Image (tube, rainbow, N blue to C red):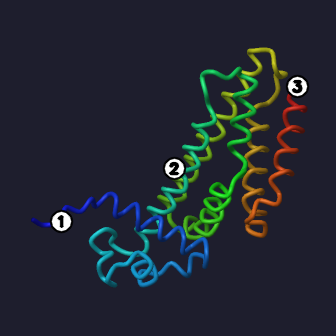
């Protein structure tokens, strides 16, 4: 009986290999040959799952953005007060663990490629819009509960996203999470300004 292959699972595995290679050696290190070798495939076998490096890079970019969306969604719990939920979303937005730091480092390596790829640039822009929308929504809920003042939440969300992106850039030099206490202190300062 022939072995049944889960092609979607194989694609996910290949993307994980690509992420690992990009994390270790940057975008340039993720060649079809290096991905195939690391994944344990013959050189041309990746063509069964991806048409070329560009499609692997696109899938990797989409996967990393999806991971960020999942982390944001995990931060929302119906059991939390609006103030607690806002704190959770802010905390979930800043890279606060090894997985988030690694994912952010991979995303940064792919940004240059995304700048010249219109569909990936749009994908990232959509991600930023969702992210800002979630932050604004959480701030409005905290305001409605009387936890924070009525302020320009769009401007504050843009500021916070810029800080989070900056933290991701800083983590290129601090992949072990050395700056996480700084990010946590910033969240406390940010919340104090809102109150």
Q: Earlier in the sequence, mark 1 or mark 3?
A: 1
Q: Residue 150's image quarter?
A: top right
Query: Which one is nearer the viewer's eye here, 24 or 116?
Result: 24
As helix, strand or loop, the secondary structure at mark 3 comes to loop
Query: Which residue occupies the extreme left position in the image?
Result: 1
The C terminus is located in which quarter? top right
The span from disc 2 to disc 3 (Cα, nearest Å) is 31 Å
The span from disc 1 to disc 3 (Cα, nearest Å) is 60 Å
The N terminus is located in which quarter? bottom left
Which residue does the image show at 39% across and 79% down from the upper left? 36
Which residue does the image show at 83% across and 22% down from the upper left? 148
Residue 72 horizontal/vertical position (percent) = 61, 40
Q: Earlier in the sequence, mark 1 or mark 2?
A: 1
Residue topped by disc 3: 195
Q: Residue 167's image quarter?
A: bottom right
Residue topped by disc 2: 66
The span from disc 1 to disc 2 (Cα, nearest Å) is 30 Å
């Amino acid at each position: 009986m022939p072995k049944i292959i889960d092609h979607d699972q194989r694609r996910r595995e290949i993307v994980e290999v690509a992420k690992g290679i990009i994390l270790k050696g940057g975008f340039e290190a993720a060649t079809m040959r290096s991905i195939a070798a690391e994944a344990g495939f013959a050189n041309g076998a990746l063509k069964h799952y991806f048409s070329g490096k560009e499609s692997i890079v696109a899938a990797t970019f989409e996967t990393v953005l999806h991971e960020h969306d999942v982390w944001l969604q995990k931060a929302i719990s119906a059991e939390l007060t609006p103030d607690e939920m806002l704190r959770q979303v802010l905390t979930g937005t800043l890279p606060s663990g090894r997985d988030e730091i690694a994912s952010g480092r991979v995303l940064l390596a792919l940004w240059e490629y995304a700048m010249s790829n219109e569909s990936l640039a749009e994908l990232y822009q959509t991600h930023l819009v969702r992210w800002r929308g979630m932050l604004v929504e959480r701030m409005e809920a905290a305001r409605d509960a009387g936890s924070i003042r009525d302020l320009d939440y769009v401007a504050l969300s843009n500021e916070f996203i810029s800080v989070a992106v900056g933290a991701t850039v800083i983590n290129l030099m601090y992949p072990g999470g050395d700056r996480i206490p700084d990010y946590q202190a910033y969240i406390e300062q940010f919340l104090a300004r809102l109150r």
